[in-house]
Amino acid sequence: MVWTKEEFSAKVRAGQQIKHPWKNAFHLEMPFGLINDPNGLSFYQGKYQIFYQWNPYGCEHKQKHWGHVATSDFIHYTEPVLAMKPDCWFDKDGCYTGCAFTENEELHVVYTGNVRTETMERQSYQCLAKAEADGTLSKEKILIERQPAGYTAHFRDPYVFFRGNKKYLLAGIQTENLAGRLVLYRETAGKWELVGEIATDFNAMGYMWECPNILHFRDEDVIVFSPQGLKAERYQYQNLYQTGYAIGTLDTEKAVFSHGKFTELDHGFDFYAPQVMEHEGRKLLLGWMGMPERDAEYPTRENGGWMFSLTIPRELVLKNHKIYQYPAVELEKLRQKEQSSVAKGAHSWEQVLPRQAEIELRICLGKAKKIAYAFYFGAERLVFIYDDTEKSMVINRTGMKLGGRGIRRFKLDCKGELHVRIFMDRTAMECFFQQGEEAAAILYFPEKECVPELSVQADEDWNQLTCKC
């Protein structure tokens, strides 16, 4: 089925009017079909431009188009449009992830065109398109026709950046020995030339590195990427695929990245393939709230006709040689009324919550060594347990009946005061721990529509609990 522009717009408007208990209020998602990787984040003509992977025809990872919305405040968005379709020989099996950049007062995107031959052999092309005023993209040309020698056709997700007056392209790739790597290209006289594979200390880190991004903080570079094939450990790498970053210095002439350790960006169940951008000094991130190859964990596919969300916009700050993440300040305009509660010298507390809420929870531990706070949805519950002895946080989703379940663990030292800022939407929850030191994105699907309740329990009396929502 192929819709005309008018038919598609009418379908979008009709889909946006559908009331469903799992439809999120302030997380960006589509009225139908499957959304995944955010693409082409940029600021152009006075608005943030957000492109993303979108299959409008179903909830399968097929027929990947690019969708588009724009916003000036991350609260009000333009109507979603199909910005780009997989309708050329070089992208017929999917317009895959890419980036955006402005040049000569025009907005351009670079993306991966995916092709499968009759024998199901993969071919990848890095392609250029130009943005039009209505948010659609006009394809211009192929920039890089094939992967370099010594690599498989898993060559994708270009990210363009500038150093001085030079333009570079970073892409994920897989060696013929099935190891994940990054390659660096430089534009010279209108052509893209391979500088080389970026040398790192990550020589045994999975079989593919997806969605690379780079940010520059004063005298340090931060490369964000999503490696596939890492072995799960007790306190890290617990999702099927990971996303994280390394801090260091990228030598663009020699393609050498001198760096520190790989650190995960998010410890929740549902976070992958983020993209970053910079505007007026702010570094902003949007991620995909979902996980590849785990489609059965998302019941909206069968009970609504849509899948996945994007995260709220997060601002990234580098301090203490670590990336801290903060909800974009614009989201404060979503606040309508505030209620506050204080409990001193207790070890048990409960409060009824709005169905969508921003919650700030502060607990001065006192004698308490273990704090459990849970969101109850009738008989179901989503539980968080902080253990001050182990300096760890556990997220337990086994108390939910529908969707993905399981447990996630990560290290967290609250140094006497547990601080959590929570953005709770109807099925999307994002938690920011210890003033942005750690983050967790979680999708949950209450079986029944009900008023949620927050309950806090401790093994001993805390000094003080403060909750604002």
Image: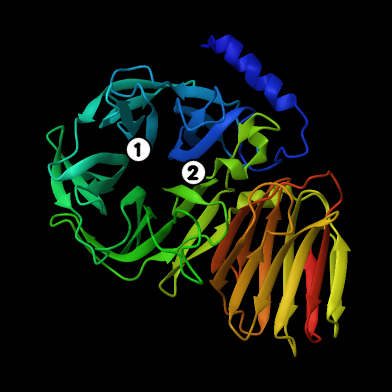
Q: Amino acid at mark 1?
A: Phe
Could you tell me residue 244's position as x and y percent? 42, 59
Disc number lying in front (2 or 1) = 2
Which residue is identified by label 1?
101
Q: Which mark is residue 148?
A: none
Q: Which of the image's four quarters has the C terminus?
A: bottom right
Q: Residues within 10 Å of mark 2 (few under 14, many from 20)?
A: few
Estimate the spatial distance between the alpha carbons at disc 2 and disc 1, rounded to whole Å. 30 Å
Q: Earlier in the sequence, mark 2 or mark 1?
A: 1
Which residue is at 71% across, 81% downward? 370
| Residue closest to the eye, 272 or 287 | 272
Residue 14 placement, left or right of 252: right
Residue 346 position (above or below residue 342): below
Question: For this view, does 262 lie left or right of residue 38?
Answer: left
Quarter-of-image position of residue 6: top right
Asked if one can make out residue 469 in the rendered structure from this viewpoint, the answer is: no
**Percent position of residue 324, x then y:** 50, 65
Q: Does residue 462 sit above or below 10 in this rendering?
A: below
Label 1: few (<14), some (14–19) or many (≥20) C-alpha neighbours in 10 Å: many
Secondary element at image label 2: loop
Left of 48 or right of it: where is 117?
Answer: left
In the current view of this chain or complex, which residue is farthest to the bottom?
367
The amino acid beneath tag 2 is Glu
Q: Residue furthest front?
A: 119
Element at badge 1? strand
Residue beneath disc 2: 293
Q: Could you tell me which residue is drawn at 30 percent across and 28 percent down?
A: 120
Q: Decide if residue 221 is on the left or right side of residue 300.
A: left
Name the spot of residue 261 as percent of width and height, x first.
35, 70
Give above or below for 373 relative to 109: below
